[in-house]
Structure formats: C-alpha cells, structure tokens
Amino acid sequence: MNGLFPVVAVILALLMLPALYRVVKGPTLFDRIIAAGMMGTNGVLVMVVLGFYYERIDMILDLAIAYALLNFIGTVAIGKYLEKHRGEVK
Amino acid sequence: MTVQIIIAAIFIVGGLFFLFVSSLGIIRMPDFYTRCHAIGKSETLGSMLLLFGLAVFNGLDTNSLKLLSILVFIALANSTATHIIARAAHRAGLRPWSLRKPQKVQDVRPGFVIAKKETVSAKFTQDNKI
C-alpha cells in the first residue's frame, strides 16, 4: 500500500493541469476563479497523500485544514467583491 | 493485504476516478455554468471518497478524526464557493450557453451583455445634446 501513495500523488498533480489550462485561457473571469479553487482543493489532497507517504501525517493535517480554509475564504471574498461591483465586470 | 487496506484502496481509486471526471469536465464543457456543474459535484465527491479511503487506511485515531473533519469541511465549502461564484456571474449578466439560434444582436455568442450603466449614460448625453 505504501508504494501506491506516490502514484496517487502524481496522478492528482497531473489532474491539476486542465484547471491550470482553464486559469490561463478562461474566456471569463469567473472561469479563472473557479479553476483556481479547484487547483486549491487538489493541492490539499496532494498534501495529505504526501503526508501519508513520508509518515508525517500528524504535522501535515493541520496545514491541510488551514489551506482548505484559506482557499474557501479567498473564493468567497472574490465572489462578494464581484457581486458588489456588478457593472464593472468585463 | 488485510481487508482494511483493500477497502481503502477501493475508496481511493473511486475518488481518483471522480477527480478525473471533474478534470475532464473543466476542459470539455462549453460554458461557465456547466463547468460549475463539473466542479461543484464531481470534485466534491472525489475529494470525499479519497479522504474517506485515507481515513480507513489510517485506522481509528486522532488523525483519522482530523481527516474526517477535512472531509466535512470540503463537502460544505466547495459547493458553497461554487454557488457564490455562479450567483455573482448570473448577477453580473453572464449569459448561459444555448443551442438556439441567436435572436438579438447581443445573443450571438455566450458572454457578457453590454453593461446597463453605459447605455443609460450614453442615452442621457444624447438627449442632452438634442
């Protein structure tokens, strides 16, 4: 089982590439924001899987909780800002 | 290979499958709202399955409790963030993608309509000139 963790981490890191494509080439601003949030969620998963691989899971889990919270708060802040400045979005 | 490790591997592989479906949807879907569909559901389900598989692999411990707390937080926060961004896009005037033929000039391709503030101010200045 311990040999499966680097494979899972590499697959998760490769699954971040389509989201990166959408961040770079998104037609609208909202596509970029939501793809960045998806990259953040995948980053949390990569972090937890690598913590299991290096057997330092008790240290990594607190960092993962903090990173998930920051990801959510950033997305909510950008959404509220765009909702308030409605006519200026292009 | 105990039963616990086999169950954990099944959950982790299922989570990877749903994350792959979400990644496929974000490059193949035609519109912002359909991409919201790909992110809000598949990504959340894949993350929940993968974290639950890791918690099963870890056994009953404080660390598995923290993993389950991350699972509950992602299940609440990911869909909420997607909903907030989709509502902001709808209120900013982003038009959904449709297969119907365009009926007005501004329906030609999916995107933003012209902001109302500019048209109102243009009309106001035109009236003032006259």
Image (cartoon, rainbow, N blue to C red):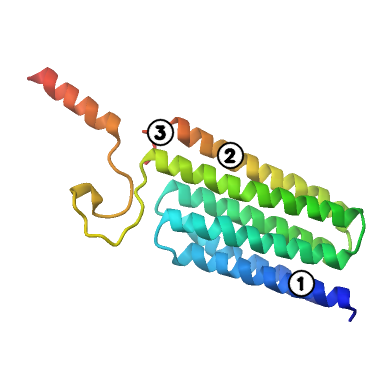
Earlier along the polypeptide chain: callout 2 or callout 3?
A: 2
On the image, the x and y values in percent for residue A1 come to 84, 76
Mark 2 neighbour class, 10 Å CA radius: few under 14, some 14 to 19, many 20 or more: some
Residue B112 placement: quadrant: top left
Q: Which residue is mark 2?
A: A76
Residue name at image x 53 percent, y 42 percent: B84
Residue name at image x 50 percent, y 33 percent: A81
| Host chain of mark 2 | A
Q: Is the Cβ of the residue at disc 1 closer than 8 Å to that at disc 3?
A: no
Amino acid under disc 3: Arg
Front in this rendered view, residue A45 or B67: B67
Earlier along the polypeptide chain: callout 1 or callout 2?
A: 1
| Residue sitting farthest toward the left | B130
Q: Which residue is mark 1?
A: A6
On the image, the x and y values in percent for residue A15 come to 60, 67
Quadrant for the C terminus of chain B in the image = top left
| Residue sitting farthest toward the bottom | B1
Residue A25 shows in the view: no
Mark 3 neighbour class, 10 Å CA radius: few under 14, some 14 to 19, many 20 or more: some
On the image, the x and y values in percent for residue B58 come to 88, 64
Amino acid under disc 2: Val
Q: Which residue is mark 3?
A: A86
| Badge 1 and badge 3 both on one subunit | yes
**Tag 2, which secondary structure?**
helix
Amino acid under disc 1: Pro
Whole-number angstrom distance, CA of label 2 to CA of label 3: 15 Å
Kindly identify which numbered label has been placed on residue A34: none
